[in-house]
Amino acid sequence: MAADLTGTTAVVTGGNNGIGRALAVGLAKAGADVAIWARNAERNAQTVAEIETFGVKALGVSCDVTDEQAVIAAMDETVATLGPLGCFVANSGISIETPIVDMSFDTWRHVLATNLDGAFLCTREAARRFVDQGVGGSMIVVSSTISRYGGAGMAAYGASKTGVLGLGRTLAVELARHRVRCNVLVPGWTKTAMNEHLQADERFVRATSGRTPVRRWAEPEEFHDIAAFLADPSLTFHTGNEVIVDGGYTIY
Ligand code: NDP
């Protein structure tokens, strides 16, 4: 049976596109009120309109997850508008692929700032709320199969996503006594804006699909129900887990 999240306030960072948007829609379908935190106000508004079609409340918050004060303000606005936090999904991310010999320190720092610093700032703010509220909650951080296997040109991205994995596991350990569960979502190759340039490379798509048992990349919509599943409050013993959604890529 699908989770009933009616009355739950959920946040999805980077929820205005790709995998985050799918997770946000899935949470709304399960009855949660959903806040989207991302920078592009127009895409935030489009996603809010889509979420509202499920009869729940939705909020778009213009927020750069690398900006500490913006993250704090986003949490204040979310809780003031939608009510106490029940589920937090740290999904925002970018990828810039460059061979390490050519990778500038600025590129390294930009990717780490968004993917790892951003995840830290957001989950720290969520953890503070959950601890203050004292009634538990669910946290999900979004890593990547690249955290396990690496990938050419992905030194910064891979390092950031392995960092996110460690962050998620640590949150599971630290927050368990507050009845806050934290799980790590590990997507495989998925057709989103982040990797449009890779999708255009037929050889690359053939090679990565060929290594995947289902022989293709995922559509973002295939992530619809995962966050809602993990946020189900009845999953009281489900924490510190890696939920791999990759068409079987990590079997090999
Ligand atoms: P998209 O490019 O479709 O979405 C990325 C989202 O992150 C957007 O909503 C974007 O919104 C937001 N974002 C980026 N930078 C910031 C920032 N500084 N502050 C706030 N929000 C930000 O990519 P995906 O859906 O593919 O990626 C979502 C997550 O999934 C990422 O963490 C990615 O690493 C992970 N992932 C993706 C895979 C794939 O194959 N697509 C595979 C494995 C993991 P805006 O620009 O409006 O701020």
Image (spheres, grey):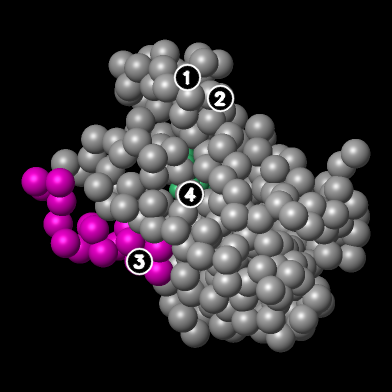
Residue 113 is tagged as 3
Q: Position of residue 239 (x, y in %)?
A: 66, 55
Q: Mark 4 points at which residue?
A: 143
The amino acid pointed to by label 2 is Gly
Q: Is residue 61 visible to the viewer in this orientation of the structure?
A: no
Question: Which quadrant holds residue 247?
Answer: top right
Camera-nearest label, 3 or 1:
1
Q: Mark 1 points at which residue?
A: 212
Identify which residue is drawn at 28% across, 43% down.
Answer: 154
Mark 1 burial class by Cα count in 10 Å: few <14, some 14-19, many 20+: many
Q: In the displayed structure, does residue 172 sit left or right of residue 179?
A: left
Q: Where is residue 51 in the image (x, y as percent from the top left)?
A: 78, 53
- Indicate the secondary structure of the residue bearing disc 2: loop
Q: Distance between the residues labelled 4 and 1?
A: 18 Å
The amino acid pointed to by label 1 is Thr
The amino acid pointed to by label 4 is Ser
Task: Specify whether tag 3 is near ligand 1 (CB below 8 Å).
Answer: yes
Residue 247 is tagged as 2
Q: What stretch is highlighted in magenta?
A: 100-117
Identify which residue is drawn at 62% across, 75% down.
Answer: 127
Q: Is the magenta stretch mostly helix, strand or loop?
A: helix
Q: Distance between the residues labelled 2 and 3?
A: 29 Å
Task: Specify whether tag 4 is near ligand 1 (CB below 8 Å).
Answer: yes
Camera-nearest label, 4 or 3:
4
Q: Which of marks 4 and 1 is nearer the N terminus?
A: 4
Q: Earlier in the sequence, mark 2 or mark 3?
A: 3
The amino acid pointed to by label 3 is Ala
Whether the residues at callouts 3 and 1 have beta carbons within 8 Å, the answer is no
